[in-house]
Image (cartoon, coloured by chain):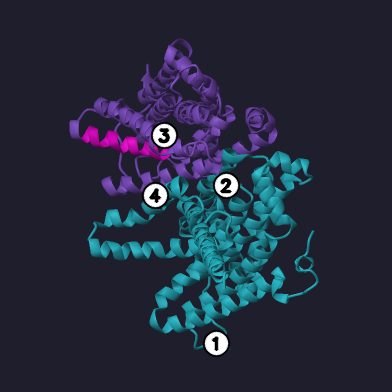
Amino acid sequence: MSYFIVLTLTGISAGMIYAALALALVLIWRATRVVNFAQGAMAMTTTYVALAVIEATGSYWIGFVAALAAGFALGAVSERLLVRWVEKGPPLNAVILTLGLLLVLEAIVPMVWGAQIRSFPAPFSISATDVGGTFVALSPFNLFTIAAVLLVMLALLVFFRFTGLGLSMRAAAFAPSTARLLGIRVGRLLTLGWGLATTAGALAGLLVAPALLLYPNNMDAVLVYGFTAAVLGGLDSPVGALVGGLSMGLALSYIGGYMGGDLETVGALAILIGVLMIRPHGLFVRMAERRV
Amino acid sequence: MTSPVSTLGGRVSWLRLTLLRNAVLGIVLALVAALGLWALDSINPFAVYQLSTVTYIAIAAAGLTILTGLNGQLSLGHGALMAVGAYATALLLKRYADLNPAVVIAASMVFTVGASLIVGVAAARLRGPYLAGATLALAVGLPGVAVRFSDVFGGDAGTPVPALTPPDAFSSVTQELWFAWVGLVPAVITFVVLANLVRTRYGRDFRAVREDEIASSLYGIRVARTQILAFVLSGACAGVAGSLMAYTSNLAAPGSFPLTLSLSLLAAIVIGGLGSLPGAIWGAFIIVFAPDWISSLNDSLNLPARVSDELPLALFGAVFVIAMLVFPHGIQGGLTRLWRWRARLRASGSSRGAAAGDPT
């Protein structure tokens, strides 16, 4: 039973990370109807940036901020320079473009920093917390993970709900031509949306790296989990991303704990296909509207 | 449907029959290739080995062309389907070491067809990005199964596959050359079958579904069934390719089927030209030989190893990006355009000549 509780707590912590990546995918999907398959590779890249900054300055927090800033820049530049030109074309082209981005990033990073596996520091202890003699499976770093992701989600919620810029962004995503007629600079907002999304992805990369270690394709599996989480949540809703992320975290923690860690990705595939088989309509309602 | 014969107004020219023309063309090209390989074998055996990998990469790429190029379903998991074929071959040969390669390859194909039927049924419900994500999960996750159940699949080390030795009648033929010759046979069969298939009702259904699912279903095409058929067909190709790969590398191991294999196959068909079967061949040549060209480029530029190791991947990625931005029809599209441009030039040239000749 206590093993079950340990798996549950670590599942929640991992689920928050998947939720952050799912959020990145959802924000980009909402803004531009593109699934950014390079999201994991982008997060991996920004984590390498963080490691370089941490090694240069000796401060985790400067590296942390640098990674988020790098994430924003990477997302915004990718949208403005590359994705902008395929948004109008067939969806296949946009997907292939982001896959190209994935390959380029996974190749350039080892060119710069080498392909060997590296450890990544955590700002807080990653060993279990001692609360009056009993050990709780949540480490301080796990608590930081949960708090950081919740904070980012809350910030984005406030931004989209209660600020003028957030309202314009929702308008630009929902009805681009109407928004344009109303004087909203849709293009700029899409760039901003990609930047924000990739910042959330960069957070996921930072939070997953202490446990997962850092190497050029360390985010491949996390991208699969994040994508599955986003699909569970409907691919269109930030709250859905959070719920989906937590469900994935728990499910994979149980699969890994009871059946073996090598099966986690296959488990994600089974969940993904299962969900889409049972509720394809609920998930596809909006897409069907768009296609007709 | 209109048969090729009727369009000729009664005059039957056998070369106009697509089926026959494709078969003859395929066999002639295969014979030329077999002779060429034989000649090359004494000069550069390693190139022959690489060409034998081209045969199975081309088969897998051809299947992916049907699925992605013609039917519009994006699969990032064809490397995993190749793994199914390779492991089927390895496990079959572990049990029955003396089985005829043709039987093994066919059985591996059937097995992969079964596996892709499962994926394909699910895939038919998945649109665009959902399918890409599910097949991505397949590509990332399937090698883990081989590691987890190591008593069956041999874990990280993989399952060895006995070498394919030439029969006594060909005892003077080297191992590499025999591989390449053996690989040519399924390659020719695959391309001839697919080249004919794309011109039948099925091929037109594939394209119709790619262009507009709703219009296709109104027209009476069963969209889901068509998509499953395309998936299974391309899965069959991946199975054959995986089986050949296992024979060629004497091994079926999880490390041979990384995500980058699936993405390389996609690179092959994007470079070659989405939806074009000859394009799949060009693409296969390029993804097999590009790492070589790049390493010779490295030797001349003196790049450090960590740059040169990653350069092929970086260039494939760059090709994806550049192709989607400026060159969405690939090599075969470029060749077709060049061909048309030449034909137009010649047509306008001759009409000018005729006009000049008119007054006299």
Do circles 3 and 4 both sit on a common chain?
no
Q: Which residues are magenta?
A: A39-55
Chain B shade:
cyan
**For the residue marked with disc 2, what is the amino acid?**
Leu
Label 4: element kind: helix
Quarter containing the N terminus of chain B: bottom right
Which residue is identified by label 2?
Answer: B74
Indicate which label's residue lies in the foreground, 3 or 1: 3
Asked whether disc 3 touches disc 2, contact meaning CB atoms under 8 Å apart, the reply is no
Which residue is identified by label 1?
Answer: B170
| Image location of residue B269, percent across then percent down | 52, 56
Residue B30 visible in the current orientation: yes
Residues A51 and B283: in front is B283
- Crowd rating for badge 4 (residues with CA inside 10 Å; few <14, some 14–19, many 20+): many
Q: Which chain is purple?
A: A
Work out how far the residue at label 2 is from the one at label 1, CA to CA, in angstroms. Answer: 42 Å
| Image location of residue B290, percent across then percent down | 39, 62
